[in-house]
Amino acid sequence: TRIEHDAFRYCSGLTNITIPDGVIDIEYCAFSGCYGLTSINLPGDLFSIGIEAFGKCDHLTSVTLPDSVASIGDRAFYGCAGLTEITLPNSLALIGYDVFGGCSSLRSVTLLNDLSYFSAGWVFGDGTCENLTSVVIGDGGTHIGDNAFAKCGSLSSITIPDGVTFIGDRAFYGCANLTEITLPNSLALIGCDVFGGCSSLRSVTLLND
């Protein structure tokens, strides 16, 4: 039911992985340093991805997270420099620190659930996701946590759906390419310095008191 920690660590010749149904846990560093890895097929009942499980798999270009994943550990995809897009499933309840740090090719993120789990730290690597340009937040989202997209300097487009009630401190700090934002009618609380350093921001629309 699980792949143990360090199981395939530094298997640099490994190019693809198919993990069978029944595996619910990928433990820490299980595939860390598999530099040649280009594709992963994850099982439909996977529950958790451990700390740095796929860290430094720098040729990995895409991964589909099944709608059963509830937990992604710290730095799980850190340094996956070839990863271009990711969808975080509706089932996700916990995401760790610096999960996508160093994913320098990441351009598109789709979030399907409540974003309060972003409050713990720099999920997008404190400025290392320099090519992230587009974020889509699903209708299920209610919270955007502290530092959620801080220092994503190329982020030019984000849709905040009606239903988001809270935006945490510095959530978009340093998003120097963000030009406009619409804050929804549902918004009840917005934190400190949310748009600090957004030097290109020209238009803000507020739909609520």
Image (tube, rainbow, N blue to C red):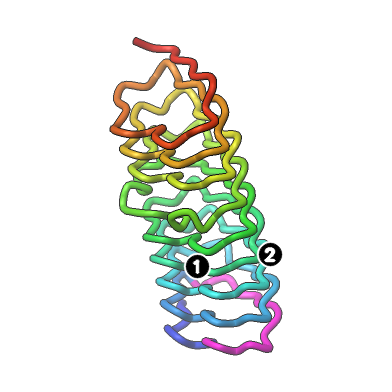
Give the residue number, with chain letter if any, for mark 1: 78
| Residue 188 against residue 170 in the figure, above or below | above
Label 1 element class: loop
The image shows a total of numbered marks equal to 2
SS assignment at label 2: loop
By secondary structure, the bulk of the magenta-drawn segment is best described as loop
Q: Does the magenta stretch include residue 82?
A: no
Q: Quadrant of residue 44?
A: bottom right
Give me the residue at 52% from left, 27% from top. 201
Q: Which residue is drawn at 50% across and 60% down?
A: 100
Q: Nearer the viewer, residue 106 or 110?
A: 106
CB atoms at circles 1 and 2 under 8 Å apart?
A: no
Choose the circle earlier in sequence order: 1 or 2.
2
Distance of mark 1 from mark 2, alpha carbons? 13 Å
| Amino acid type for the residue under numbered disc 1 | Tyr
Q: Residues within 10 Å of mark 1 (few under 14, many from 20)?
A: many
> Which residue is nearer to you in this view: 38 or 149?
149
Q: Which residue matches tag 2? A: 61
Height in image: 203 above or below 18?
A: above
Which residue sits at x=46%, y=58%?
Answer: 125
**Which residue lies at the image location 68% right of the left edge and 81% below the top edge?**
36
User: Which range of residues does the magenta coloring cover?
Assistant: 9-23
Expressed as whole percent of the image width and height from the top left, the position of residue 105 reads: 64, 58
What amino acid is labelled 2 in the image?
Answer: Thr
* Extreme residue in the front direction: 199
Location of the C terminus (image quadrant):
top left
